[in-house]
Amino acid sequence: MAAGSEISTDCISNPIFEELRALGFGREPRPFFPRTRDADIPVWRDATGILFLQEVATSNAYYEAEKPESRAHGATVVQTRNGSMLTSALEDADRRLAQFGELIAGKRVCDFGCGHGDWIGRAHMAGERFAVELRGHCLDYIAEHYPEVKTAKSIEAFDDLEVVTLFHVLEHIPAQREILRQIRSRMRPGGLLVVEVPHANDHLIHAGPEAFKSFTFWSEHLVLHTRDSLQALLADAGFADVSVEPFQRYGLANHRGWFEEGRPGGHVRHTVADAEDLAYREDLARRWATDTIIALARA
């Protein structure tokens, strides 16, 4: 097909596509990858680099019906069949506590889409702690292990929040503008929003093996934002002082696993020098080719 020729978008039913177009994105969309790893859902890419699914196969009911043993998505797995939490999830929680601990000290903090509560439950430097989660088995886990955390299925249950965090949650939500505005309405003026999401310009997506795309695209990840689209989305929801920074969760050892073996888990099988790993992460950040972007914004 000739460059610049029109491609019909009639097949795109993902509501995020319309939200992107309302924000000035979504131009010249093109098919990017034929399917997600768990469903025959094509992945599209717009002219600015945003990646999004053609359709949405999830819903609130989908998440509410999820079983404890059903979630198996790499490092985001937080519970095994016997109820134990995996190290990778706790490592992310520890990293976030180190990154944001000073920002939440003594504050009314809510983790939106908290999963099993491994971050908010251990955020003892916060003042009051709140958590929003749809999955019943996660709420049961929090009640047993972190009873001091107040939980609800909707953020409407809480108000006057000083900090709200969304760690790898926004990409699961189809009505992103609505949810972000709802979150802002429950925050104290000047309160802090922290959003961490996977990045559309991930180095492995564009320079890695095809096996990585087959692994990383997932029916639950409805969109992979860029710096510009995430910033515009938060500003549109009424947030101010929006800043977006690159962050690399997985280092050189993990990438070696993909480039040399075409499979995940390289950070478990390989060892690299700390200095070499740091230099690699810093290079990805300079090029805005990280696997993650993190936004801070004020209500």
Image (spheres, rainbow, N blue to C red):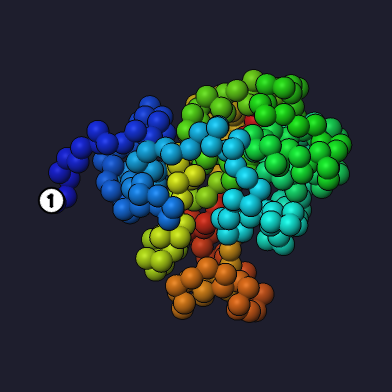
Relative to 147, 94 lies left or right:
left
Q: Which residue is at a point 70% across and 41% down the rendered structure image?
A: 137
Quarter of the image with the C terminus in it? top right
Mark 1 residue crowding within 10 angstroms, few (<14) / some (14–19) / many (20+): few
Quadrant of residue 141 in the image?
top right
Amino acid on which the number 1 mark rests in the picture: Ala
Q: Position of residue 27 (x, y in %)?
A: 29, 38
Q: Which residue is at a point 55% across and 46% down the rendered structure image?
A: 197
Q: Is residue 241 visible?
A: yes
* Extreme-left residue of the structure: 2
Secondary structure state at the residue bearing disc 1: loop
Q: 296 above or below 255?
A: above
Q: Which residue is at a point 69% across and 56% down the rendered structure image?
A: 81
Q: Position of residue 146 (x, y in %)?
A: 83, 42
How many marks on residues? 1
Residue receiving disc 1: 2
Q: 260 above or below 16?
A: below
Q: 256 above or below 88?
A: below
Q: Is residue 23 visible?
A: no
Q: Position of residue 200 (x, y in %)?
A: 44, 50
Relative to 163, 233 lies left or right:
left
Q: Nearer the viewer, residue 22 or 76?
A: 76
Relative to 168, 258 lies left or right:
left
Q: Position of residue 13 (x, y in %)?
A: 34, 33
Q: Which residue is at a point 33% across and 54% down the rendered structure image?
A: 33
Q: Nearer the viewer, residue 299 or 214?
A: 214
